[in-house]
Amino acid sequence: MQKLRPDMDIGHNIQFLRHLAGLTQDETVAKLHLMNLNISKSTYAKLETNRMNIKVSELVALSIIFNSNFDDFFRGLRDEFSSHFD
């Protein structure tokens, strides 16, 4: 399964989008299970804290659950990346 390396703070954006959707981690994990993605709460917490790589399928599912665009997951990361070269 293809994964995205969390070498930048995508986890913060995942957490922000979850809060914006009004969901707890437990509720988010339950919705992922309904989409046949077997992920534990501890694994999900690691995604939000950048301690685990996120699978592309998980990112797609989260975009559906949070009713968000893919751009929302990467918001601010371009500026963060660019600041390393100024």
Image: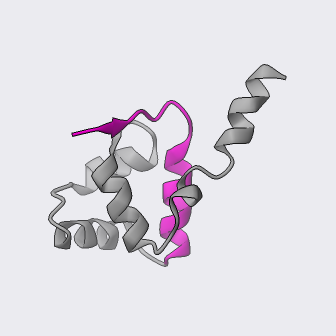
45 and 69: which is toward the camera? 69
Residue in front for this viewpoint, 22 or 77: 77
x 56%, y 62%: residue: 16
As drawn, 64 above or below 11: below
Placement of 66 over or under 48, stated as above or below: below
Among all residues in the image, which is located at the extreme bottom? Answer: 22
Q: Residue at x 78, y 29 (%)?
A: 83
Query: How many numbered marks does the figure carry?
Result: 0
Residue 52 visible, this orientation: no
Q: Position of residue 54 (x, y in %)?
A: 35, 44
Q: Quadrant of the N terminus?
A: top left
Residue 68 in view in this figure: yes
Q: Is residue 52 above or below residue 11?
A: above
Question: Is residue 7 one of those drawn in magenta?
Answer: yes
Q: Quadrant of residue 60?
A: bottom left
Which stretch did the figure color magenta?
Answer: 1-21
Q: Quadrant of residue 51?
A: top left
Residue 65 image offset from top left, x and y in percent: 38, 72
Kindly identify the residue that appears in the image at 68 percent across and 40 percent down.
Answer: 78
